[in-house]
Image: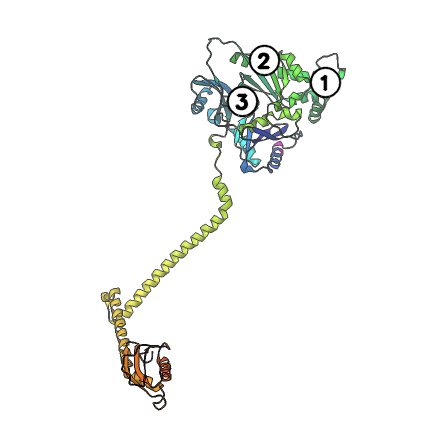
């Protein structure tokens, strides 16, 4: 099965193609397609056209597509529940988030992710997103020509790079102390073009995610304002020459000014991060151990060193390709930094029921079965023809039945008239039984007449003797004596004697002509024969009735 993660950003589209294997997975392809920076063009149309073109090479029936909700569209909190069952957790989330939502519950879709089991309870990331935001992502996917399998969240997708997503949620014992010691936690900073995400991982699980309204565009705007460049020029300048000077005395005056321009913009990011980190630190009793960076903005030269000095803990770019089991193409640092969310989304579709992927396709957005729709598209025309033929068949059957009934009624009427005129059967006496009885008597009389005619034309034994005599040669030529003729229905026997064997043969030839079958069978003679005479006896079939 192929899983496609689709990360649609404001600067580019990232596509990750992952194939699941029996034991693991393989990253088959990664792509980043930059979007136009021209503000006068419709970016939505460009996104749809681009993705539609990319997806033409996939078999939609054998491919799973996963899209993401931006983190800024999701309200997320870590909650604790005294039970572990997922259906109970899902039911309880709405009431727990009621006071924290900036929008109405009726307009929200709730989702959960169990991050840890703790005794008989569980720690859960409870999330809520406005329905209209989910609808926008789903509409975008449909416009791109696909029906998404999942709609997840950017932060949860990114978390797959740092969690054991293929295993069930970890088990943890409840705290034995009333006031536990601070726990070590890691920060994950994903710097996008318009927004950034701050993820917190503690003891191998994600316990929080926050959105920061700051991205690479802020640095480009600062460069454009400083040097009088338009937006497109400023972005290109940042990509080609962006850097931070860590030692002010090393660079030239122009380099120092350029670095200070970017650094001033970064102070907004640092200030927002300090507030988020302070909030998370006090809420979860944390102490920070290290920070990791992803996203296109993390490629800024010396950014890790700058954040390390600001927060007094190590910040480094995260090298995600080191954790994946197989990558079948040549990679770059840029591709490694920007495709984290896309890869995480593709991994969401590979999750098993023991640790299922969160999915905002619920309620009115729940996936519908397209089996019957596909079946209709394939066989609809044939079904229409079959339905039309069936309707015509019904109409024909009804018309035929009506016509048959009319003919039957007309035949009954004519039959009664004929019965009255021929047989004298009037009124009730002209019923079917009386008519059948009359016809039966007529047929019986006809059969009797035929039998009488046959008896009248019946050939007697004397007639048969005359017929045979007429066929035999005169006595002067063939002297013979017929002593006996017996007739049983259509079988006759002729017994007699003649002066020679040749005479017997001539008699047999004559009898064969008289026979109705053309055969005369020699049988044992039962008469007394004078001395010097040769007896003969033949059996043959004859025609008793004159005229056939």
Instruction: Give the left or right position of residue 163, taking residue 528 as reference.
Output: right
Q: Which residue is mark 3?
A: 164
Asked if the residue under mark 3 is in contact with the one under mark 1, i.e. CB atoms within 8 Å, the reply is no
- In the rendered view, would you say 388 is above or below 96? below
Q: Which residue is mark 1?
A: 258
Q: Mostly what secondary structure, the magenta segment?
A: helix
Q: Quadrant of residue 71?
A: top right
Label 1 Cα crowd, 10 Å radius (few <14 / some 14-19 / many 20+) = many
Could you tell me which secondary element the residue under label 1 belongs to? helix
What's the CA distance linking mark 1 and mark 3?
A: 42 Å
Locate residue 441, reporting x and y percent.
25, 71
- In the rendered view, would you say 501 is above or below 291? below
Depth check, front residue: 519 or 151? 519
Label 3 Cα crowd, 10 Å radius (few <14 / some 14-19 / many 20+) = some
**Comparing labels 3 and 2, the label whose residue is closer to the camera:** 3
Q: Quadrant of residue 213?
A: top right
Asked if the residue under mark 2 is in contact with the one under mark 3, i.e. CB atoms within 8 Å, the reply is no
**Quadrant of the image for the C terminus?**
bottom left
Residue 194, can we see it? no
Marker count (numbered)? 3
Locate residue 188, reporting x and y percent.
59, 19
Question: Sequence-wise, which precedes: disc 3 or disc 2?
Answer: 3
Locate residue 169, reporting x and y percent.
49, 21
Q: Which residue is mark 2?
A: 289
Q: How is the image coloured?
A: rainbow
Where are the magenta residues, as a range? 42-46
What's the CA distance linking mark 1 and mark 2?
A: 31 Å
Question: Sequence-wise, which precedes: disc 1 or disc 2?
Answer: 1
Could you tell me which secondary element the residue under label 3 belongs to? loop
Locate residue 487, reporting x and y percent.
28, 78
Tell whether position 44 is magenta: yes
């Amino acid at each position: 099965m192929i899983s496609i993660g689709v990360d649609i950003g404001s600067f580019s589209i990232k596509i990750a193609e992952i194939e699941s294997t029996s034991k693991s997975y393989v990253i088959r392809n990664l792509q980043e397609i930059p979007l136009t920076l021209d503000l006068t063009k419709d970016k939505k149309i460009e996104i749809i056209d681009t993705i539609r073109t990319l997806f033409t090479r996939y078999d939609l029936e054998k491919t799973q597509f996963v899209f993401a909700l931006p983190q800024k569209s999701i309200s997320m909190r870590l909650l604790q529940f005294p039970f572990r069952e997922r259906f109970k957790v899902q039911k309880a989330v709405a009431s727990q988030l009621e006071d924290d939502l900036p929008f109405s519950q009726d307009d929200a879709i709730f989702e959960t992710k169990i991050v840890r089991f703790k005794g008989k309870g569980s720690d859960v990331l409870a999330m809520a997103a406005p329905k209209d935001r989910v609808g926008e992502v789903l509409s975008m996917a449909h416009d791109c020509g696909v029906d998404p399998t999942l709609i997840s969240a950017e932060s949860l997708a990114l978390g797959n790079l740092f969690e054991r997503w293929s295993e069930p949620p970890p088990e943890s014992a409840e705290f034995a102390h009333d006031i536990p010691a601070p726990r070590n936690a890691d920060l994950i900073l994903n710097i996008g073009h318009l927004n950034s995400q701050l993820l917190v991982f503690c003891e191998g699980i994600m316990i929080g995610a926050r959105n920061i309204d700051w991205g690479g565009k802020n640095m480009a705007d600062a460069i454009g304002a400083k040097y009088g460049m338009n937006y497109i020029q400023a972005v290109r300048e940042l990509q080609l020459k962006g850097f931070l000077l860590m030692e002010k005395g090393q660079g030239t005056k122009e380099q120092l000014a350029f670095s200070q321009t970017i650094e001033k913009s970064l102070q907004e990011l640092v200030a927002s991060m300090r507030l988020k980190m302070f909030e998370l630190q006090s809420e979860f009793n944390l102490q920070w151990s290290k920070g990791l960076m992803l996203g296109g903005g993390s490629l800024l030269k010396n950014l890790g060193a700058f954040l390390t000095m600001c927060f007094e803990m190590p910040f480094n770019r995260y090298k995600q390709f080191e954790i994946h089991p197989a990558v079948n193409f040549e990679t770059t640092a840029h591709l490694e930094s920007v495709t984290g969310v896309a890869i995480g989304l593709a991994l969401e579709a590979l999750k098993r029921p023991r640790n299922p992927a969160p999915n905002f396709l619920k309620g009115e957005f729940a996936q519908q079965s397209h089996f019957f729709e596909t079946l209709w598209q394939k066989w609809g025309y044939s079904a229409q023809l079959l339905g039309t033929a069936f309707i015509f068949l019904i109409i024909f059957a009804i018309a035929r039945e009506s016509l048959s009934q009319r003919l039957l009624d007309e035949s009954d009427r004519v039959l009664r008239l004929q019965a009255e005129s021929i047989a004298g059967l009037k009124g009730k006496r002209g019923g079917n039984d009386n008519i059948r009885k009359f016809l039966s008597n007529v047929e019986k009389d006809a059969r009797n007449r035929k039998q009488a005619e046959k008896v009248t034309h019946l050939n007697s034994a004397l007639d048969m003797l005359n017929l045979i005599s007429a066929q035999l040669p005169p006595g002067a030529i063939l002297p013979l004596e017929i002593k006996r003729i017996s007739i049983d229905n259509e079988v006759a026997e002729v017994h007699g004697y003649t002066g020679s064997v040749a005479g017997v043969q001539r008699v047999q030839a004559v009898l064969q002509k008289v026979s109705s079958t053309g055969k005369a069978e020699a049988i044992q003679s039962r008469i007394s024969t004078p001395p010097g005479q040769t007896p003969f006896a033949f059996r043959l079939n004859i025609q008793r009735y004159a005229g056939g």
